Amino acid sequence: MTGPPKMLDFPTFDRALGAMVREAAMLEHYLETIVKVLCGSPHGALLISGESTSRVLTVCKALIDAHTEIPEEHRTDFKKMLTDAKTAFEQRHTYVHGAIAWQDEGIPGNARSRRLKHEPDFHPIESDDLHNLAQEFNRLIFRAGYFLRLAIEGFPDHLSVEYSED
């Protein structure tokens, strides 16, 4: 390292990290609720409660595949959302399970130890990256909410829009 490490604005970083974690938890909650609805049983919670996000995603995909009455357009869109969610959760893991470290020219990042690897994985970090990841989780929450409503209504071709005159 030729110069001093770059300093992180920890309060800003911590706020961005907290916002991202909150959005990720909300998406996971929506996905768990979708699993429970698709199970069609009051015991659906037993399949998913307390499971890892990768398990939640796997069960969502399996249930979508099992429900052959779901129109292909919804099935395709839902699987795309699950793929995007998997990518976002993998990025979340880097931030949540890594320790702050500096590498090379004082670049701040997260270092995660990995199974059977001598050196930790290092990923540079920026508060803007966390902000963008939180926005991605927020986008996915809205997609999951849409699919939850579709599941509750039996996967109609179009969702009805009801307006209140209050």
Image: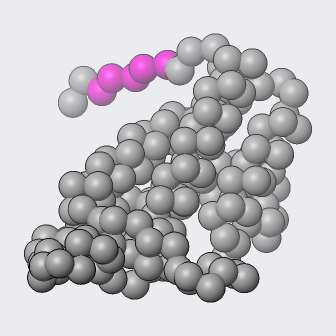
Horizontal relation, residue 21 to residue 86: left or right: left
**Quadrant location of the C terminus?**
top left
Name which quarter of the figure residue 76 lies in: top right
Q: Is the magenta stretch mostly helix, strand or loop?
A: loop
In the displayed structure, 34 sits above or below 93; it is above
| Depth order, front residue of 119/100 | 119
Nearest the viewer among 7 and 26 is 7
Residue at the spot 65% in from the left edge and 49% down from the top edge: 34
Picture residue at 46% right of the left edge, 64% below the top: 92
Residue at (72% x, 82% y) in the render: 116
Residue lying at the far front in this picture: please name it: 2
Count how many numbered circles sit on residues in the image.
0
Q: For the magenta stretch, what is the residue range?
A: 160-164
Image spot of residue 155 (x, y percent):
68, 26
Rendered location of residue 48, percent (x, y): 73, 66
Residue 38: image quadrant is top right
* Residue 58 higher or lower than 71, as above or below: below
Asked if residue 81 shows in the view, the reply is yes
Q: Looking at the image, which residue is at 33% across and 23% down?
A: 163
Q: Give the quadrant of the N terminus.
A: bottom left
Asked if residue 119 lies left or right of residue 153, the reply is left
In the image, is residue 161 part of the stretch drawn in magenta? yes
Q: Is residue 73 above or below residue 117?
A: above
Q: Is residue 126 above or below residue 103?
A: above
Q: Position of residue 4 (x, y in %)?
A: 12, 82
Q: Which of the 4 image quadrants contains residue 148?
A: top right
